[in-house]
Image: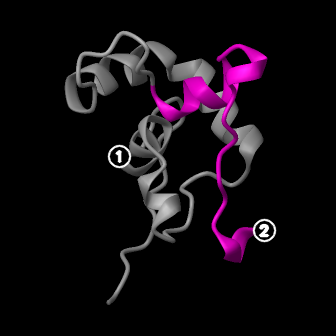
Amino acid sequence: MTRRPRKKARQGELTKEQLQELCSQMGLLIGNPSPFESDAQRRAAWFEHRDRVLLHYQQRYATGRKSEMPAAWHAYEAPPDERRAYREPAHRR
């Protein structure tokens, strides 16, 4: 299977892959490389684009449960006892 090269986002924008990773870690969990260079870059993208990510998540992923939030929220904003770290694929550890 041939992988497409990662697209670079224009300054201040998210790529489709970055938006998907902030909503759901599915790409990471199945072994795709992260579209972010580091956790710090992912965190910065979350806080810069939080409102857009939340809207996208509600439209695409949410099932109606009030407690349901995007993966980035769980990693960076959930109460400390409820935080879930991003799970990096083995090749990035």
For the residues marked 1 and 2, what is the alpha-carbon distance in whole angstroms? 24 Å
Could you say where residue 35 lies in the image, as x and y percent from the top left?
A: 54, 55
Q: Residue at x 45, y 22 (%)?
A: 69
Q: Which residue is drawn at 46% across and 33% down?
A: 13
* Secondary structure category for the residue under label 1: helix
Indicate which disc residue 16 carries.
1
Which of the two residues, 78 or 39, is positioned nearer the viewer here?
78
Which of the two residues, 37 or 23, is positioned nearer the viewer here?
23
As drawn, 63 above or below 7? above
Could you say where residue 63 lies in the image, as x and y percent from the top left?
A: 23, 24
Q: Residue at x 55, y 67 (%)?
A: 33
Q: Quick one: quadrant of the C terminus?
A: bottom right
As drawn, 13 above or below 34? above
Could you say where residue 6 lies in the image, as x and y percent from the top left?
A: 46, 64
Q: Is 91 included in the stretch rendered in magenta? A: yes
The residue that mark 2 highlights is 93
As drawn, 29 above or below 70? below
> Which segment did they paint magenta?
70-93
Could you say where residue 89 lies in the image, as x and y percent from the top left?
A: 63, 67
Q: Is 21 included in the stretch rendered in magenta? A: no
Q: Callout 1: few (<14), some (14-19), or many (20+) C-alpha neighbours within 10 Å?
A: few
**Is 2 placed left or right of 10 in the picture?**
left
Q: Which of marks 1 and 2 is nearer the N terminus?
A: 1
